Amino acid sequence: MAKGPKFELKTPKGTKDWQGKDMVIRDKIFSTITEAFKRHGAVTIDTPVFELKDILAGKYGEDSKLIYDLADQGGEICSLRYDLTVPFARWLAMNGSVQSIKRYHIAKVYRRDQPAMTKGRMREFYQCDFDIAGVYDPMLPDAEIIRVATEVFEGLGWKGRYTIKLNHRKILDGIFEVCGVPEDKIRTISSAVDKLDKLPWEDVRKEMTEEKGLAEDVADRIGEYVVQKGQKDLLSKLQADEKLMANASMKAGLEDMDLLFGYLEAFKCLENVSFDLSLARGLDYYTGIIYEVVTEGSAPLVSTSAATAAPPKSSKKPKKVADADEDRSSDPSVGVGSVAAGGRYDNLVGMFAGKGKQIPCVGISFGVDRIFSITKARMEEEQTAEQVRNNDVDCFVMAFGGKGFTGLLKERMSICSTLWEAGIKAEFLYKVKPKLPNQFKAAEVNGVPFSVILGEDEIAQGKVKIKENGLRDGHPEKDGVMVNLDALVSEVKQRLKRKADIDNMTRKADGLRVVGGIKDDKAKIEAIPAEAPTSEASASNPTDSAPSAEGVEPASETEKPAEESPLSQEAIGAVPAS
C-alpha cells in the first residue's frame, strides 16, 4: 500500500504559538495598555470571534477582500471579525439603552493579509481597542483618545521613538474638492493617498492617473498638499489659504483641528503629534479626526525611481524569491506600518440601527503583535531579552541536610502554603530528597530573586534562612540571613518591597539607556549613568542605588560597581512592570 504525502506539523500561515519569555513580554504590554485604559474610566466588553457576514460587508473599503469567510455549512453565513470596531458598533445598535460608554476590548482579529511575522504583521493577531461613544462637545473625546495613546507609548518606554500622525476626513475631502476630484472618485483617490506611507508619491500618482482615471493636473495639485506636515504652523498655513477656506468641508475640518490642538496642549501631549495631510486611512466608516501611530523606520525604503528602474539582466539561475516575511528589512521597526490607529466614526452605529439611532464614536486600536516585535527587537539590541524572567515567582523554597537527610518535603510544602496564603509567589522542587545544587539551579533558571532555605536543625529551632539570589561576592548577606519561622512572611514582604523600590529607581535612572536611543546621541550620553549600581549592590544601602533618581544620592566614586542584575525591572527593556 502506497504511503500518502507526509503531513507537516505546523501552524497555519500567518499564525504562531506563543510561549516562554515572549509571553512574559506580551503580558507586560497587555498590562501597560490595560492600565492606561482603566485609568481613563473605561469598562470592557466581549463580542463573538465571528459575525454574520452581512455585518462586516461594505465597512472596510478595498480591505474587505481580506476578511476571512467561514464555509457555508447550511446555516448562517459568517465571517471572522476583521477588527473590534464594527462588532462594537453592532453591539451599540443592539443595546438601545446604552447611549454613552467608554469601552475597551482586547481580543484576536483575523485578516487574509500577506504576513511578515518578524514585523508583527500576521493573519491572527491581538488588537487592544479604546473607544468613547456618546454625544459630547466637539473634539473633547478625540483629544482624550490621543492622550491615551501617549500614555500607552510612554508607559512602554518609547519616549521620542513614535509619532502620532493626525488628519481629518473633512480636510481630505476639502483638498480633493478644491483640487477638482470628481465626487464619485473621492473615496477611491483617498484610498490611493492612504498608500503614501508605503509607496513614494510617483507610484501613488501613477495609480491615481493610470488606474483610476484622474486627470494629471488634478493629481499634481493633490501632490502639493499631501506632502505637507507640521503642527499649529501647518494649521495656520491652511487657514490663511483663501481658496481652501472657501470650501465648507475644509473650513469645518480646520475648525475641529484648531480646537483639537488647544485641547492637546492642555493635555500636555503635543510633543509627538504631527498634522500630516498624507494620512488618509482606508476604512470607509471614518467621518472626522483620523490618526496613526508610527515608529521610526515606518517610511518606505523605496526610492522615487525604484518603480521604473529595470532589473539587471543575469545569466545565472534566478534565486528563490524571498518569503514575504523577509520583505524590505530584517529590522522589525522598518516597514511595520502603524502600531496603533483610529479615528472618529459617527455614522457606523446608524448603519445597523437606522438613522433614528446615531451614536457618535471615536476610538483607537493598538496592534499588540507589532508593538511586541519592535519591543523585543530593541531588547535584543540592548542585550536585555535574555534577562526576562519566565515567571514571576518571588521565593524558591528549598532544603538541605547531611547524612540521613529526609528532604523536609512536607515542611517545604507547608512553608509554600504559608507564603501562598500571604499572596507571595513561591515554588519548590518536586523531589522528595532534592540535591541542593539542583534546587539552586531551578531558582536560577527562572530568575527567582529569593530563596527560603530549610535545614533540619534550623527547623527544629523554628528558624529558616532567607537568601537573596545573585548577590556579589563579599556582600554581607551573600550567604543569607536567619529569621524566625513565624516572621518569615513579614521578612519576605519587606525584602521584596525594598528590592522593587531599588529596581524601580534603577529603571527610572537608566530609562533613556534601556530603550536604545530615544534622544539624539549627545542627549543619550549625557543621560546615561556611567556605572549605575544595581539592586544587588544596593540591597544593604538603598542610598547607593541609581544616580540622581528622585533625590537618591549617587554612589561613591571609589565604590566598585556591581555587575548588572538580571532581575532589575530594566531587564524587560521597553516594557515597564505593571
Image: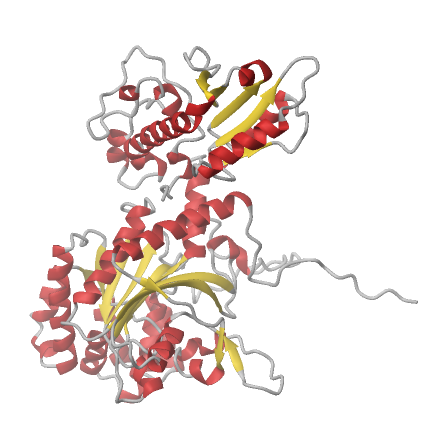
Nearer-the-camera pick, 507 or 307:
507
Residue 282 higher or lower than 305, as above or below: below
Residue 442 falls left or right of residue 577: right
- The quarter of the displayed image where residue 572 is located: top left
Residue 117 higher or lower than 446, as above or below: below
Total numbered labels placed on residues in the image: 0
Residue 510 % position (x, y)? 31, 32
Furthest-right residue in this view: 1
Q: How is the image coloured?
A: secondary structure
Q: Is residue 445 visible?
A: no
Nearer-the-camera pick, 413 or 362:
413
Residue 546 falls left or right of residue 125: left
Q: Residue at x 36, y 69 (%)?
A: 195
- The quarter of the displayed image where residue 490 is located: top left
Q: Residue at x 25, y 33 (%)?
A: 522
Residue 350 % position (x, y)? 30, 84
Residue 392 % position (x, y)? 47, 38
Q: Is residue 55 visible?
A: yes
Quadrant in which the C terminus is drawn = top left
Quadrant in which the N terminus is drawn = bottom right
Residue 555 higher or lower than 181, as above or below: above
- The quarter of the displayed image where residue 47 is located: bottom left
Residue 74 falls left or right of residue 190: right
Q: Residue at x 48, y 38 (%)?
A: 420
Residue 80 % position (x, y)? 51, 74
Residue 550 higher or lower than 327, as above or below: above
